[in-house]
Image: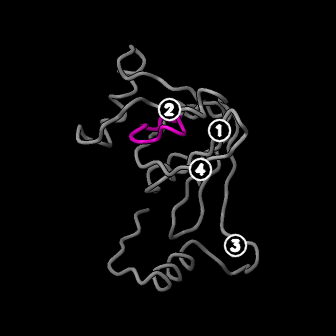
């Protein structure tokens, strides 16, 4: 299970931040991409609380999972807010635009400097030894009444 694989399979990631007053915030993010093993880009489309929190406290956690397999990654590190008009921001915006066209209004970019990553998975994998990604997919498709889902490997 590789991080890049789950970045590509995940529809959303969740960015956890903490504000200056120590109030936690978790916010779903739709547009994200991995630059390298240590750098994740997340488009800030409509996240003023996440932006304010990152500026106040750079420590963040990002989780992403394949919702059908119920496996993925948790990333911890520090974040910075990069203006899309800066040199670095323009470069990062090109990477974002490879997965999201101009219709997404990218205010700025959260650059996550990954310090640690760990695999995460649903408790079923530990509780029931016969659990496999395929069995999780089958169960999820039935439970959530999803028709015509094509799992990509």
Q: Mark 4 falls on what kind of element?
A: strand
Residue 77 image position (x, y, % from top left): 67, 34
Image quarter of residue 57: top right
Place of residue 62 in the rendered image (x, y in percent of width and height, measured from the top left): 60, 45
The residue labelled by disc 3 is 125
Whole-Å distance between the Cαs marked 2 and 1?
11 Å
**Which residue is identified by label 1?**
60
As for residue 47 lying within the magenta part, the answer is yes
Tell which of 74 and 20 is nearer to you: 20
Q: Does the magenta stretch include residue 36?
A: no
Mark drawn on residue 33: none
Count every numbered label the image shows and give the total: 4
Q: Is mark 2 on a helix, strand or loop?
A: strand
Q: Mark 2 points at which residue?
A: 110
Q: Which mark is residue 26?
A: 4
| Most foreground residue, 117 or 81 | 81
Q: In the orientation shown, which residue stands out farthest toward the top?
A: 87
> Please, what secondary structure does the residue beneath circle 1 have?
strand
Residues at discs 2 and 1 in contact (Cβ within 8 Å): yes
- Give the label, 3 or 1, closer to the camera: 1
Magenta residue span? 40-51
At which x and y percent is residue 48?
48, 37
Q: Are discs 3 and 1 less than 8 Å apart at CB?
A: no
Q: In the image, which is nearer the foreground, mark 2 or mark 3?
A: 2
Sort mark 3 into few (<14), some (14-19) or many (20+) by Cα contacts within 10 Å: some
Kindly report which numbered mark, 1 or 4, lies closer to the viewer in this rendering: 4
């Amino acid at each position: 299970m590789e991080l890049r694989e789950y970045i590509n399979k995940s529809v959303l990631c969740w960015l956890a931040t903490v504000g200056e007053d120590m109030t936690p915030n978790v916010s779903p993010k739709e547009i994200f991409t991995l630059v390298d093993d240590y750098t994740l880009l997340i488009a800030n489309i409509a996240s003023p609380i996440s932006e304010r929190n990152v500026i106040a406290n750079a420590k963040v956690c990002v989780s992403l999972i394949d919702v059908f397999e119920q496996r993925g990654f948790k990333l911890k590190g520090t974040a910075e807010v990069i203006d899309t008009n800066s040199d670095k921001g323009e470069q990062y915006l090109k990477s974002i635009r490879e997965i999201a066209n101009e219709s997404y209004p990218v205010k700025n970019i959260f650059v996550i400097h990954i310090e640690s990553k760990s695999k995460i998975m649903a408790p079923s994998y530990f509780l029931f030894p016969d659990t496999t990604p395929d069995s999780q997919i089958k169960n999820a498709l039935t439970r959530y009444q999803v028709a015509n889902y094509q799992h990509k490997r």
